Image: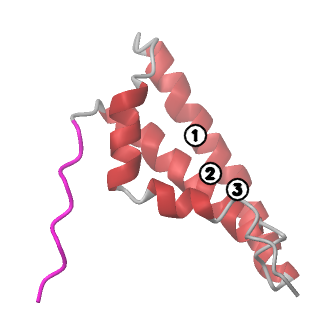
Amino acid sequence: MLPPELPPLPALTRAEGEFIDCYLEVVDQLGRINPARGTHTYGALRAAQALAARAEALRDALALMHARGESELHAPVLGRALRVLGGERRTARIILPPQSMS
């Protein structure tokens, strides 16, 4: 049986698509660094190193949008794109896990 089909991505400019992709890459690295969820310093170190490069790409995507005259972020549309791409699951790794009762 095939998994359910994802809803289509909303129409985005190329720069908006790059912005969303870079944002999620930054979120992924932050999730790997999260000290409340990690287990090894080496993995967190590698994620922190990658975070710097991903943050640069995010900055560049936003600079390109600004240079092209895309002066507004359309939050409802970008939010839908984030949800389709697993943004809720990916950002959940950034927050603190529930406190254990032990």
**Within the image, what quadrant is residue 16 found in?**
top left
Question: Which quarter of the figure is the C terminus placed in?
Answer: bottom right
Q: CA distance from mark 2 to mark 3?
A: 5 Å
Q: Is residue 96 left or right of residue 9?
A: right
Going 61% across and 34% down the picture, which residue do you hit?
Answer: 59
Check disc 3 and give the amino acid type.
Leu
Label ID, residue 51 = 3
- Contact between labelled residues 3 and 2, with CB atoms less than 8 Å apart: yes
Q: Between residue 60 and residue 88, name the one nearer to us.
A: 88
Going 41% across and 15% down the picture, which residue do you hit?
Answer: 70
Q: Which residue is mark 2?
A: 54
Label ID, residue 75 = none
Disc 2 is placed on an element classified as helix
Disc 1 is placed on an element classified as helix
Question: Which quarter of the figure is the N terminus placed in?
Answer: bottom left
Q: Which residue is mark 1?
A: 58
Q: CA distance from mark 2 to mark 1?
A: 6 Å
Q: Would you call the spot at circle 3 few (<14 residues within 10 Å), some (14-19), or many (20 or more)?
A: many
Going 46% across and 11% down the picture, which residue do you hit?
Answer: 71
